[in-house]
Amino acid sequence: MTTSPHATSPSTTSNPASAPPHLAIVLFSLAMGGFAIGTTEFASMSLLPFFAADLHIDEPAAGHAISAYALGVVLGAPLIAVLGARFARRTQLLALMAVFALGNALTALAPGFGWMVAARFLSGLPHGAYFGIAALVAASLVPQHRRSRAVGQVMLGLTVATIVGVPLANLIGQAVGWRASFGLVSVLALLTMLLCALFAPRDRAGRSDPLRELGALRSGRVWITLAISAIGFGGMFAVYTYLATTLIEVTKVSTEVIPFFLAIFGIGATLGNLFVPRFADRALMPTAGVILLFAAVALLAFPLAAGNPWLLAIDIFAIGASVALGAVLQTRLMDVAGDAQALAAALNHSAFNTANALGPFLGGLAIRQGLGWTSTGPVGAALALLGFLIWIVAYRDKGPALVAHGSGAARDDAPVRPAPPLAPDLRSRSDAPKDPVA
Protein backbone atom coordinates (compact mmCIF):
# COMPACT_ATOMS: atom_id res chain seq x y z
CA MET A 1 0.00 0.00 0.00
CA THR A 2 1.32 3.44 -0.83
CA THR A 3 0.27 7.01 -0.67
CA SER A 4 3.48 8.63 -1.82
CA PRO A 5 3.50 11.18 -4.58
CA HIS A 6 5.51 8.75 -6.70
CA ALA A 7 2.64 6.28 -6.58
CA THR A 8 0.44 8.47 -8.67
CA SER A 9 2.98 9.39 -11.27
CA PRO A 10 2.39 8.18 -14.83
CA SER A 11 5.65 6.31 -14.86
CA THR A 12 4.40 3.77 -12.37
CA THR A 13 1.03 3.12 -13.97
CA SER A 14 1.30 3.53 -17.71
CA ASN A 15 3.39 0.46 -18.43
CA PRO A 16 1.18 -1.85 -20.52
CA ALA A 17 2.94 -4.91 -19.14
CA SER A 18 1.69 -4.06 -15.66
CA ALA A 19 -1.84 -3.12 -16.72
CA PRO A 20 -4.49 -4.98 -14.69
CA PRO A 21 -6.94 -7.44 -16.25
CA HIS A 22 -10.35 -6.23 -17.35
CA LEU A 23 -11.84 -4.04 -14.66
CA ALA A 24 -14.95 -6.19 -14.23
CA ILE A 25 -12.80 -9.24 -13.40
CA VAL A 26 -10.78 -7.29 -10.83
CA LEU A 27 -13.91 -5.90 -9.17
CA PHE A 28 -15.49 -9.37 -9.12
CA SER A 29 -12.40 -10.82 -7.44
CA LEU A 30 -12.44 -8.10 -4.80
CA ALA A 31 -16.20 -8.45 -4.32
CA MET A 32 -15.84 -12.19 -3.71
CA GLY A 33 -13.96 -11.35 -0.52
CA GLY A 34 -16.83 -9.07 0.44
CA PHE A 35 -19.22 -11.95 -0.25
CA ALA A 36 -17.33 -14.20 2.16
CA ILE A 37 -17.13 -11.48 4.81
CA GLY A 38 -20.78 -10.51 4.43
CA THR A 39 -21.87 -14.13 4.69
CA THR A 40 -20.11 -14.71 8.00
CA GLU A 41 -20.97 -11.30 9.48
CA PHE A 42 -24.70 -11.44 8.81
CA ALA A 43 -25.18 -15.22 8.95
CA SER A 44 -23.77 -15.32 12.47
CA MET A 45 -26.70 -13.10 13.51
CA SER A 46 -29.30 -15.28 11.79
CA LEU A 47 -27.67 -18.42 13.25
CA LEU A 48 -27.62 -16.99 16.77
CA PRO A 49 -30.64 -19.01 18.02
CA PHE A 50 -29.06 -22.23 16.73
CA PHE A 51 -25.55 -21.97 18.17
CA ALA A 52 -26.98 -20.58 21.41
CA ALA A 53 -29.08 -23.72 21.85
CA ASP A 54 -26.23 -26.03 20.83
CA LEU A 55 -23.78 -24.40 23.25
CA HIS A 56 -26.39 -24.19 26.05
CA ILE A 57 -26.44 -20.42 26.52
CA ASP A 58 -29.20 -17.83 26.22
CA GLU A 59 -29.46 -15.60 23.13
CA PRO A 60 -28.31 -12.31 24.72
CA ALA A 61 -25.18 -14.13 25.96
CA ALA A 62 -24.67 -15.69 22.54
CA GLY A 63 -24.62 -12.16 21.14
CA HIS A 64 -21.14 -11.81 22.69
CA ALA A 65 -19.81 -13.89 19.80
CA ILE A 66 -21.13 -11.25 17.39
CA SER A 67 -19.63 -8.50 19.51
CA ALA A 68 -16.28 -10.33 19.56
CA TYR A 69 -16.22 -10.33 15.76
CA ALA A 70 -17.06 -6.63 15.70
CA LEU A 71 -14.31 -5.94 18.25
CA GLY A 72 -11.84 -7.78 16.04
CA VAL A 73 -12.80 -5.52 13.14
CA VAL A 74 -12.54 -2.36 15.22
CA LEU A 75 -9.06 -3.22 16.50
CA GLY A 76 -7.73 -5.03 13.47
CA ALA A 77 -8.60 -2.47 10.78
CA PRO A 78 -6.37 0.41 11.95
CA LEU A 79 -3.64 -1.85 13.30
CA ILE A 80 -3.25 -3.82 10.07
CA ALA A 81 -3.54 -0.68 7.93
CA VAL A 82 -0.63 0.93 9.79
CA LEU A 83 1.57 -2.17 10.02
CA GLY A 84 0.93 -3.04 6.38
CA ALA A 85 1.86 0.41 5.07
CA ARG A 86 5.05 -0.86 3.42
CA PHE A 87 3.54 -3.94 1.76
CA ALA A 88 1.97 -4.22 -1.68
CA ARG A 89 -1.81 -4.15 -1.65
CA ARG A 90 -2.09 -7.43 -3.52
CA THR A 91 0.07 -9.12 -0.89
CA GLN A 92 -2.10 -7.70 1.87
CA LEU A 93 -5.31 -8.92 0.23
CA LEU A 94 -3.95 -12.48 0.07
CA ALA A 95 -2.67 -12.46 3.65
CA LEU A 96 -5.89 -11.01 5.04
CA MET A 97 -8.03 -13.64 3.32
CA ALA A 98 -5.74 -16.39 4.68
CA VAL A 99 -6.30 -15.19 8.26
CA PHE A 100 -10.02 -14.84 7.58
CA ALA A 101 -10.23 -18.42 6.29
CA LEU A 102 -8.39 -19.68 9.37
CA GLY A 103 -10.65 -17.80 11.79
CA ASN A 104 -13.83 -19.21 10.28
CA ALA A 105 -12.42 -22.73 10.16
CA LEU A 106 -11.61 -22.46 13.87
CA THR A 107 -15.14 -21.18 14.53
CA ALA A 108 -16.56 -24.29 12.87
CA LEU A 109 -14.34 -26.50 15.05
CA ALA A 110 -14.77 -24.60 18.34
CA PRO A 111 -15.34 -27.09 21.21
CA GLY A 112 -17.06 -24.52 23.44
CA PHE A 113 -18.44 -21.00 23.54
CA GLY A 114 -15.19 -19.48 24.86
CA TRP A 115 -13.26 -20.93 21.95
CA MET A 116 -15.93 -19.72 19.58
CA VAL A 117 -15.65 -16.15 20.90
CA ALA A 118 -11.86 -16.25 20.40
CA ALA A 119 -12.26 -17.60 16.86
CA ARG A 120 -14.82 -14.91 16.01
CA PHE A 121 -12.40 -12.24 17.22
CA LEU A 122 -9.66 -13.68 14.97
CA SER A 123 -12.10 -13.79 12.04
CA GLY A 124 -12.91 -10.11 12.51
CA LEU A 125 -9.31 -8.86 12.48
CA PRO A 126 -8.86 -8.85 8.65
CA HIS A 127 -12.39 -7.60 7.87
CA GLY A 128 -11.91 -3.83 7.90
CA ALA A 129 -8.43 -3.83 6.42
CA TYR A 130 -9.58 -6.01 3.52
CA PHE A 131 -12.50 -3.76 2.63
CA GLY A 132 -10.35 -0.65 3.02
CA ILE A 133 -7.61 -1.93 0.72
CA ALA A 134 -10.11 -3.38 -1.77
CA ALA A 135 -11.90 -0.02 -1.94
CA LEU A 136 -8.64 1.82 -2.62
CA VAL A 137 -7.68 -0.66 -5.34
CA ALA A 138 -11.10 -0.24 -6.99
CA ALA A 139 -10.97 3.56 -6.79
CA SER A 140 -7.46 3.60 -8.22
CA LEU A 141 -8.62 1.90 -11.41
CA VAL A 142 -11.34 4.35 -12.45
CA PRO A 143 -11.63 8.08 -13.14
CA GLN A 144 -12.46 10.36 -10.21
CA HIS A 145 -16.12 10.78 -11.10
CA ARG A 146 -16.65 7.00 -10.96
CA ARG A 147 -15.15 6.34 -7.51
CA SER A 148 -18.37 5.88 -5.56
CA ARG A 149 -19.71 3.43 -8.12
CA ALA A 150 -16.49 1.41 -8.14
CA VAL A 151 -16.45 1.23 -4.33
CA GLY A 152 -20.14 0.36 -4.40
CA GLN A 153 -19.44 -2.54 -6.76
CA VAL A 154 -16.85 -3.94 -4.37
CA MET A 155 -19.41 -3.60 -1.58
CA LEU A 156 -21.88 -5.53 -3.74
CA GLY A 157 -20.09 -8.66 -2.58
CA LEU A 158 -21.26 -7.95 0.95
CA THR A 159 -24.82 -7.12 -0.06
CA VAL A 160 -25.19 -10.05 -2.46
CA ALA A 161 -24.09 -12.20 0.46
CA THR A 162 -27.22 -11.09 2.29
CA ILE A 163 -29.31 -12.36 -0.66
CA VAL A 164 -27.51 -15.62 -1.38
CA GLY A 165 -24.83 -16.35 1.20
CA VAL A 166 -26.77 -15.61 4.38
CA PRO A 167 -29.97 -17.48 3.46
CA LEU A 168 -27.85 -20.38 2.22
CA ALA A 169 -25.82 -20.41 5.43
CA ASN A 170 -29.05 -20.27 7.43
CA LEU A 171 -30.51 -23.22 5.50
CA ILE A 172 -27.28 -25.18 5.96
CA GLY A 173 -27.32 -24.29 9.64
CA GLN A 174 -30.83 -25.65 10.03
CA ALA A 175 -30.27 -28.77 7.89
CA VAL A 176 -26.69 -29.78 8.78
CA GLY A 177 -25.65 -27.59 11.70
CA TRP A 178 -24.34 -24.09 12.30
CA ARG A 179 -20.72 -25.29 12.16
CA ALA A 180 -21.08 -26.23 8.50
CA SER A 181 -22.09 -22.64 7.71
CA PHE A 182 -18.81 -21.27 9.03
CA GLY A 183 -16.95 -24.00 7.16
CA LEU A 184 -18.60 -22.74 3.96
CA VAL A 185 -17.28 -19.23 4.67
CA SER A 186 -13.76 -20.61 5.06
CA VAL A 187 -14.02 -22.18 1.60
CA LEU A 188 -15.25 -18.87 0.14
CA ALA A 189 -12.23 -17.12 1.64
CA LEU A 190 -9.87 -19.61 -0.01
CA LEU A 191 -11.64 -19.01 -3.33
CA THR A 192 -11.08 -15.27 -2.89
CA MET A 193 -7.38 -15.87 -2.35
CA LEU A 194 -7.22 -17.75 -5.64
CA LEU A 195 -9.06 -15.01 -7.55
CA CYS A 196 -6.94 -12.22 -6.09
CA ALA A 197 -3.76 -14.17 -6.82
CA LEU A 198 -4.83 -14.46 -10.45
CA PHE A 199 -6.44 -11.10 -11.16
CA ALA A 200 -5.60 -8.45 -8.53
CA PRO A 201 -3.28 -5.74 -9.96
CA ARG A 202 0.37 -6.38 -9.20
CA ASP A 203 1.57 -3.26 -7.44
CA ARG A 204 4.93 -2.48 -5.93
CA ALA A 205 5.54 -2.53 -2.20
CA GLY A 206 4.28 0.63 -0.59
CA ARG A 207 6.37 3.70 -0.03
CA SER A 208 4.19 4.91 2.79
CA ASP A 209 5.06 4.46 6.44
CA PRO A 210 3.14 4.06 9.70
CA LEU A 211 3.64 7.70 10.71
CA ARG A 212 2.16 8.94 7.45
CA GLU A 213 -0.84 6.63 7.83
CA LEU A 214 -1.35 7.80 11.40
CA GLY A 215 -1.67 11.31 9.98
CA ALA A 216 -5.34 10.52 9.30
CA LEU A 217 -5.95 10.70 13.04
CA ARG A 218 -5.11 14.43 13.03
CA SER A 219 -8.05 15.28 10.78
CA GLY A 220 -11.28 16.32 12.45
CA ARG A 221 -13.13 15.60 9.22
CA VAL A 222 -11.98 11.99 9.32
CA TRP A 223 -13.25 11.56 12.88
CA ILE A 224 -16.62 13.15 12.24
CA THR A 225 -17.16 10.98 9.15
CA LEU A 226 -16.31 7.92 11.21
CA ALA A 227 -18.77 9.08 13.89
CA ILE A 228 -21.57 9.22 11.31
CA SER A 229 -20.85 5.61 10.39
CA ALA A 230 -20.42 4.34 13.96
CA ILE A 231 -23.70 5.89 15.17
CA GLY A 232 -25.87 6.05 12.06
CA PHE A 233 -25.32 2.43 11.05
CA GLY A 234 -26.13 1.15 14.55
CA GLY A 235 -29.87 1.36 13.84
CA MET A 236 -29.76 -1.18 11.04
CA PHE A 237 -27.80 -3.63 13.18
CA ALA A 238 -30.15 -3.17 16.15
CA VAL A 239 -33.01 -4.56 14.05
CA TYR A 240 -31.14 -7.11 11.93
CA THR A 241 -29.47 -8.88 14.87
CA TYR A 242 -32.81 -9.84 16.41
CA LEU A 243 -34.75 -10.16 13.16
CA ALA A 244 -34.87 -13.98 13.17
CA THR A 245 -36.28 -14.07 16.69
CA THR A 246 -38.71 -11.24 15.92
CA LEU A 247 -40.01 -13.19 12.93
CA ILE A 248 -40.62 -16.23 15.12
CA GLU A 249 -42.03 -14.48 18.21
CA VAL A 250 -43.92 -11.52 16.72
CA THR A 251 -44.63 -12.19 13.06
CA LYS A 252 -45.30 -15.87 13.90
CA VAL A 253 -43.65 -17.33 10.80
CA SER A 254 -41.99 -20.74 10.66
CA THR A 255 -38.21 -21.02 10.75
CA GLU A 256 -38.23 -22.22 7.13
CA VAL A 257 -39.44 -18.76 6.01
CA ILE A 258 -36.64 -16.83 7.75
CA PRO A 259 -34.20 -17.13 4.80
CA PHE A 260 -36.82 -15.46 2.59
CA PHE A 261 -36.86 -12.36 4.79
CA LEU A 262 -33.08 -12.34 5.00
CA ALA A 263 -32.96 -12.39 1.20
CA ILE A 264 -35.41 -9.46 1.04
CA PHE A 265 -33.03 -7.46 3.23
CA GLY A 266 -30.17 -8.41 0.92
CA ILE A 267 -32.04 -7.39 -2.22
CA GLY A 268 -32.65 -3.97 -0.70
CA ALA A 269 -28.97 -3.65 0.25
CA THR A 270 -27.80 -4.75 -3.19
CA LEU A 271 -30.07 -2.39 -5.10
CA GLY A 272 -29.07 0.39 -2.75
CA ASN A 273 -25.39 -0.19 -3.50
CA LEU A 274 -26.12 -0.36 -7.23
CA PHE A 275 -28.04 2.89 -7.58
CA VAL A 276 -27.36 5.19 -4.62
CA PRO A 277 -23.62 5.71 -5.42
CA ARG A 278 -24.69 7.22 -8.75
CA PHE A 279 -26.26 10.08 -6.80
CA ALA A 280 -23.28 10.21 -4.45
CA ASP A 281 -20.92 10.80 -7.38
CA ARG A 282 -22.89 14.00 -8.05
CA ALA A 283 -23.64 15.13 -4.48
CA LEU A 284 -21.74 13.08 -1.93
CA MET A 285 -22.70 14.50 1.45
CA PRO A 286 -26.34 15.36 0.62
CA THR A 287 -26.80 11.73 -0.41
CA ALA A 288 -25.47 10.56 2.96
CA GLY A 289 -27.92 12.82 4.79
CA VAL A 290 -30.90 11.55 2.79
CA ILE A 291 -29.92 7.93 3.52
CA LEU A 292 -29.82 8.59 7.27
CA LEU A 293 -33.29 10.18 7.27
CA PHE A 294 -34.66 7.40 5.07
CA ALA A 295 -33.25 4.79 7.48
CA ALA A 296 -34.80 6.54 10.48
CA VAL A 297 -38.26 6.44 8.90
CA ALA A 298 -37.92 2.76 7.93
CA LEU A 299 -36.75 1.82 11.43
CA LEU A 300 -39.59 3.73 13.08
CA ALA A 301 -42.04 1.78 10.93
CA PHE A 302 -40.58 -1.58 12.04
CA PRO A 303 -42.87 -2.12 15.09
CA LEU A 304 -45.93 -1.20 13.00
CA ALA A 305 -45.01 -3.62 10.22
CA ALA A 306 -43.78 -6.53 12.35
CA GLY A 307 -47.23 -8.10 12.78
CA ASN A 308 -47.83 -8.44 9.04
CA PRO A 309 -45.33 -10.49 7.01
CA TRP A 310 -45.97 -8.55 3.77
CA LEU A 311 -45.58 -5.13 5.35
CA LEU A 312 -42.54 -6.38 7.23
CA ALA A 313 -40.95 -7.58 3.97
CA ILE A 314 -41.34 -4.07 2.50
CA ASP A 315 -39.89 -2.46 5.61
CA ILE A 316 -36.94 -4.86 5.74
CA PHE A 317 -36.24 -4.09 2.08
CA ALA A 318 -36.12 -0.36 2.92
CA ILE A 319 -33.83 -0.92 5.92
CA GLY A 320 -31.53 -2.98 3.73
CA ALA A 321 -31.30 -0.19 1.14
CA SER A 322 -29.74 2.07 3.79
CA VAL A 323 -26.58 -0.10 3.68
CA ALA A 324 -25.52 2.07 0.73
CA LEU A 325 -24.36 4.62 3.32
CA GLY A 326 -21.17 2.56 3.67
CA ALA A 327 -19.95 3.17 0.12
CA VAL A 328 -20.86 6.87 0.35
CA LEU A 329 -18.90 7.41 3.55
CA GLN A 330 -15.99 5.37 2.17
CA THR A 331 -15.69 7.86 -0.68
CA ARG A 332 -15.99 10.78 1.73
CA LEU A 333 -13.01 9.45 3.67
CA MET A 334 -10.96 9.36 0.46
CA ASP A 335 -11.70 13.07 0.10
CA VAL A 336 -10.66 14.12 3.59
CA ALA A 337 -7.88 11.70 4.58
CA GLY A 338 -5.02 13.33 2.70
CA ASP A 339 -1.99 11.05 2.49
CA ALA A 340 -3.39 8.57 5.03
CA GLN A 341 -5.76 6.89 2.58
CA ALA A 342 -5.32 3.28 3.72
CA LEU A 343 -5.84 3.91 7.43
CA ALA A 344 -8.88 6.11 6.84
CA ALA A 345 -10.44 3.53 4.50
CA ALA A 346 -9.90 0.76 7.05
CA LEU A 347 -11.20 2.89 9.90
CA ASN A 348 -14.53 3.20 8.09
CA HIS A 349 -15.08 -0.49 8.69
CA SER A 350 -13.97 -0.13 12.29
CA ALA A 351 -16.72 2.46 12.63
CA PHE A 352 -19.17 0.21 10.77
CA ASN A 353 -18.50 -2.58 13.23
CA THR A 354 -18.62 -0.25 16.18
CA ALA A 355 -22.19 0.18 14.98
CA ASN A 356 -22.40 -3.61 14.76
CA ALA A 357 -21.59 -3.79 18.47
CA LEU A 358 -23.55 -0.71 19.57
CA GLY A 359 -26.82 -1.50 17.78
CA PRO A 360 -27.24 -5.06 19.10
CA PHE A 361 -26.19 -3.94 22.59
CA LEU A 362 -28.77 -1.16 22.80
CA GLY A 363 -31.41 -3.29 21.08
CA GLY A 364 -30.77 -6.15 23.50
CA LEU A 365 -30.93 -3.73 26.42
CA ALA A 366 -34.39 -2.59 25.32
CA ILE A 367 -35.54 -6.19 24.98
CA ARG A 368 -34.23 -7.11 28.41
CA GLN A 369 -36.11 -4.16 29.89
CA GLY A 370 -39.31 -5.80 28.71
CA LEU A 371 -40.04 -3.43 25.82
CA GLY A 372 -40.52 -6.30 23.37
CA TRP A 373 -38.70 -7.61 20.32
CA THR A 374 -39.93 -4.78 18.11
CA SER A 375 -38.42 -2.14 20.41
CA THR A 376 -35.26 -2.51 18.33
CA GLY A 377 -36.96 -0.37 15.66
CA PRO A 378 -37.29 2.84 17.73
CA VAL A 379 -33.82 2.23 19.19
CA GLY A 380 -32.46 1.99 15.66
CA ALA A 381 -34.33 5.10 14.53
CA ALA A 382 -32.82 7.07 17.41
CA LEU A 383 -29.33 6.01 16.34
CA ALA A 384 -30.01 6.97 12.71
CA LEU A 385 -31.26 10.40 13.77
CA LEU A 386 -28.25 10.90 16.01
CA GLY A 387 -26.07 10.02 13.03
CA PHE A 388 -27.97 12.64 11.02
CA LEU A 389 -27.23 15.29 13.66
CA ILE A 390 -23.54 14.46 13.35
CA TRP A 391 -23.92 14.64 9.57
CA ILE A 392 -25.26 18.21 9.91
CA VAL A 393 -22.05 19.22 11.69
CA ALA A 394 -19.95 17.59 8.97
CA TYR A 395 -21.97 19.13 6.14
CA ARG A 396 -21.72 22.65 7.58
CA ASP A 397 -17.93 22.36 7.82
CA LYS A 398 -16.76 24.12 4.65
CA GLY A 399 -13.24 24.90 5.81
CA PRO A 400 -10.02 23.67 4.18
CA ALA A 401 -9.25 19.98 4.50
CA LEU A 402 -6.16 17.83 4.31
CA VAL A 403 -4.68 17.59 0.81
CA ALA A 404 -2.79 14.60 -0.52
CA HIS A 405 -0.11 14.65 -3.16
CA GLY A 406 -1.60 14.55 -6.61
CA SER A 407 -5.01 15.76 -5.56
CA GLY A 408 -7.63 16.21 -8.20
CA ALA A 409 -10.38 18.71 -8.71
CA ALA A 410 -12.36 19.89 -5.78
CA ARG A 411 -15.95 18.89 -5.06
CA ASP A 412 -18.70 21.24 -4.01
CA ASP A 413 -19.38 19.38 -0.77
CA ALA A 414 -15.90 18.03 -0.12
CA PRO A 415 -13.33 20.53 -1.35
CA VAL A 416 -10.45 18.11 -1.20
CA ARG A 417 -10.05 15.12 -3.48
CA PRO A 418 -6.79 13.23 -3.10
CA ALA A 419 -6.04 11.10 -6.14
CA PRO A 420 -6.28 7.40 -5.27
CA PRO A 421 -2.84 5.76 -4.98
CA LEU A 422 -1.77 3.73 -8.00
CA ALA A 423 -4.49 5.31 -10.13
CA PRO A 424 -3.77 4.75 -13.81
CA ASP A 425 -4.52 7.53 -16.24
CA LEU A 426 -7.29 5.70 -18.07
CA ARG A 427 -7.74 8.55 -20.49
CA SER A 428 -4.23 8.04 -21.84
CA ARG A 429 -4.48 4.28 -22.28
CA SER A 430 -5.54 3.07 -25.69
CA ASP A 431 -7.11 -0.07 -24.22
CA ALA A 432 -9.03 1.77 -21.51
CA PRO A 433 -12.76 1.01 -21.47
CA LYS A 434 -14.99 3.95 -22.34
CA ASP A 435 -17.18 3.35 -19.30
CA PRO A 436 -15.11 1.21 -16.94
CA VAL A 437 -17.81 0.62 -14.34
CA ALA A 438 -20.90 0.49 -16.55
Image (cartoon, grey):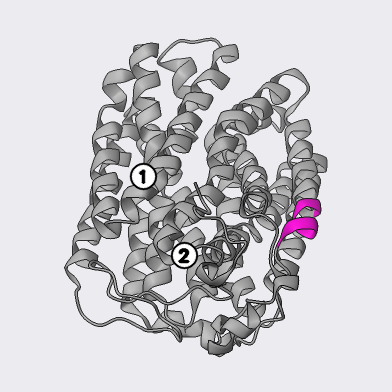
Magenta highlight range: 194-200
Q: Residue 34's x, y, as percent?
A: 61, 48
Q: Between residue 91 and residue 110, name the one nearer to us.
A: 91
Q: Amino acid at mark 1?
A: Val
Q: Which residue is mark 1?
A: 276
Q: How packed is label 1: few (under 14 Cα within 10 Å), some, or many (20 or more)?
A: many
Front label number (2 vs 1): 2
Determine if the magenta segment contains residue 205: no
Residue 150 visible in the current orientation:
yes
Q: Amino acid at mark 2?
A: Pro
Task: Answer left or right for 119 relative to 165.
Answer: right
Q: Residue at x 55, y 76 (%)?
A: 421
> Above or below — where is 303 with respect to 80?
above
Outermost residue, left direction?
Answer: 396
Q: Indicate the quadrant containing the N terminus: top left, top right, bottom left or bottom right.
A: bottom right
Determine if the magenta segment contains residue 197: yes
Q: Residue 45's x, y, as percent?
A: 56, 36
> Above or below — where is 374 with respect to 27?
above
Give the secondary structure at mark 2.
Answer: loop
The first of marks 2 and 1 along the sequence is: 2
Q: Residue at x 29, y 32 (%)?
A: 298
